[in-house]
Image (cartoon, grey):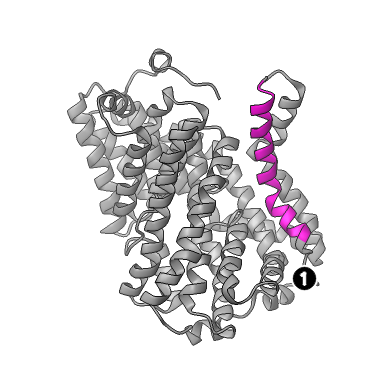
Amino acid sequence: MTSLSVETLAADAVEPITSAGHAQLGIAVLAGIAVIVLLITKFKMHAFLALTIGSLALGAFAGAPLDKAITSFTAGLGSTVAGVGVLIALGAILGKLLADSGGADRIVDTILARAGGRSMPWAIVLIASVIGLPLFFEVGIVLLIPVVLMVAQRGNYSLMRIGIPALAGLSVMHGLIPPHPGPLVAIDAVDANLGVTLALGVLVAIPTVIIAGPVFSKIAARWVDIPVPEKMVQGSSGTLDKRLSDGAAKLPGFGATIATVLLPVALMLSKALVDIVVDNPEHTVQRVFDVIGSPLIALLAAVVVGMFTLGRAAGFTKGRITATVEKSLGPIAGILLIVGAGGGFKQTLIDSGVGAMVLEISKDWAIPALLLAWLIAVVIRLATGSATVATVSAAGLVAPLAADMSTTHTALLVLAIGAGSLFFSHVNDAGFWLVKEYFGMNVGQTIKTWSAMETIISVVAGALVLLLSLII
């Protein structure tokens, strides 16, 4: 991706839907975000509805005609769903195939069979990171927590020593690595190169997950020393038993499963590498990799391959594979709507002139653009409790700052937003309560472990992004 100058953007920019000054626009932004926060936290409204109403409130406070505000919102929603909706759907299909076929069981069983003692937390974080690549965070938790509880109980490990690495692996993948919805939306919003973002995301993710996972788990285990909740172990029938009862005959092979999970990552990274080495859009090799390394083709290829390496290898019939695909799409409807509404909010921000205002004002600030992006995401995350809402909202606000950035720094902007969106999960985050209940902790213990871990991820990843910006 080539850098665009501010002058070029200004020449191509659409006339703002309002003539409000900076002060009124600033108040409109705060009011719009406040409406979203209030509706989500006080009235427990679904994030899709809150973002929709907040977008219209933003337009109203900015003095924009209601019809133009509606047009901006619907245009942003449509373009966002068009840009990332298919990718989210493909990721959900791949994750469902991985779970239902027993491919996840194969990864878990193989790695755990080779680990023990002090290496167990490292094995768990590896499992969570690999499985977390194609799975949504909530799905990953549901899939991994029974394994975590059984490993801790049977191996007589501290629950936090095993649980924190699993949660860290899932959370880091969710916040930093495409094809998860948050990073994809941010990439789309700031027009970042997906392959470069993925490569740098992996570079940031590895040390982050080590510090927040196996290293922090030692401290967390001292802070919160609780037994494995018996009701959760007894109440969780193994995923293998369920898979067998659903008609699967055997587990897919370990090598084939790993290859399928990593196939889209390998294709997208190959495209990024070819773009750097060849650096000629007209070259045949680069054009080929531009196609096979695009996220749509990469994920589609993984899904098609997964139908054979996961579904057919597990003994699924064609009808069973079709049913699995159908079941995978239903649960992501809410995610697609939230992501789409976030894109609508972003477009309303841009069309109201807020993006241009942020760009103009920030010219005189001493604060780096990457740190600004991280801070904005942190504030929205603390207020709404949603990492996805924080990502899409922050991306819309700071998108104009990417105009003068190089390809690598635009990718780092995406990662800064993703890192900020993970900061200090607390009582307004559904993930907080999910972790609390699964591990049988009280609120204070959950804050000491889960919330602290999320904060460590956010701060470490943010610091690494800033460090990389000074080097590359």
Residue 298 showing in the rendered view: yes
Q: Residue at x 72, y 69 (%)?
A: 110
Q: Circle 1 sits in a helix, a strand or a loop, which is it?
A: loop
| Near-viewer residue (325 or 415) | 415
Give the magenta range: 255-279
Tell me the residue at 51%/32% (across/down).
408
Quadrant for residue 248, please give it.
bottom right
Q: Per the image, is 238 magenta?
A: no
Which residue is tagged 1? 248
Name which residue type carries label 1: Ala
- Quarter of the view holding residue 85: top right
| Nearer-the-camera pick, 323 or 281 | 281
Residue 137: x and y in percent read: 51, 59
Instruction: State the residue at coordinates (38%, 36%).
Output: 370
Residue 274 lies in magenta, yes or no?
yes
Residue 309 against residue 154 in the figure, above or below: above
Could you say where residue 172 lies in the image, as x and y percent from the top left?
50, 54
Magenta portion: prevailing SS class: helix
